[in-house]
Amino acid sequence: MPDWGTLGLFLLAALALVVTPGPAVLYIVTRSLDQGRGAGVASALGIEAGTLVHVAAAVIGISALVASSATAFAVVKYLGAAYLISMGVRTLISRPEPETLVVRPPRSRLRIFWQGIAVQVLNPKTALFVLAFLPQFVDPGRGSAVTQTVIFGVLMAVIGLFSDLVYAMIAGAAGGFLRRSTVFPRIQRYVSGGVYIGLGATTALMGSRD
């Protein structure tokens, strides 16, 4: 079990890191703008569930394999890029709703949750970050390294969830205002699709040691 001083230092470091906008935050903001706070919350839950997958992978050594193998890293990287770009393309080519339609049937929150998991799991940058960040706070003299890694990983996911929910609430409120405008519905799919494609391109261009 880590000591309280180490826990406090970890919480401060994790908070400083998770509040910085990245691909996951952009995904949550896009979903919130598109479908409201509920969709933002579902995407945030999915993102942090994906973070826990990376924590589990770090514990059993899968992240180490991805970090050390150029082939494995490339496979995960391009799978993630292809998934994000495909989401963007589907959004761009989708037909806009008729202007006379006032209420749109919401997409499944469960589907949004699973998409959030996929976005985070297929992001090799997260795997490398978890692998590099968590071990810095593990002290073999304080007990099982596995137990300490799990504790730190869960704490990081919880902090990330609170941060993600703040982004979801703010973007959801802004989205409600934008959706009442006459201009935003016409450009909404282009904004959302462009964000997804941009995220995919960023993932594809990342180097394994960036």
Image: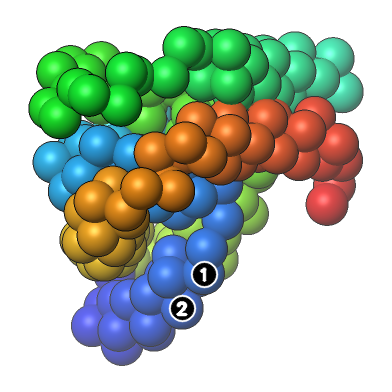
User: Residue 20's mark?
Assistant: 1
* Observer able to see residue 142: yes
Quarter of the rendering containing residue 93: top right
Residue type (three-letter) at the residue carrying disc 1:
Thr
The answer to whether 163 appears left or right of 25 in the picture is left
Quarter of the rendering containing residue 185: top left
Q: Point out the frontmost of discs 2 and 1.
A: 1
Quarter holding the N terminus? bottom left
The percent coordinates of residue 105 (x first, y second) are: 14, 18
Label 2, on which residue?
Answer: 16
The answer to the question of whether label 2 and label 1 lie on touching residues, with beta carbons closer than 8 A, is yes
Q: Secondary structure at mark 1?
A: loop
Q: Residue at x 24, y 51 (%)?
A: 180
Q: Is residue 210 above or below residue 170?
A: above
Callout 2: few (<14), some (14-19), or many (20+) C-alpha neighbours within 10 Å? few
The percent coordinates of residue 131 (x first, y second) are: 58, 46
The percent coordinates of residue 15 (x first, y second) are: 38, 75
- Using the numbered discs, state the Cα–Cα distance from disc 2 to disc 1 in whole angstroms: 7 Å
The answer to whether 200 appears left or right of 127 in the picture is right
Q: Residue at x 49, y 12 (%)?
A: 94
The answer to whether 125 appears left or right of 114 in the picture is right
Toward the viewer: 15 or 116? 116
Residue type (three-letter) at the residue carrying disc 2:
Ala
Toward the viewer: 59 or 99? 99
Q: Residue at x 19, y 22 (%)?
A: 101
Q: Is residue 128 above or below residue 67?
A: below
Quarter of the rendering containing residue 151: bottom left
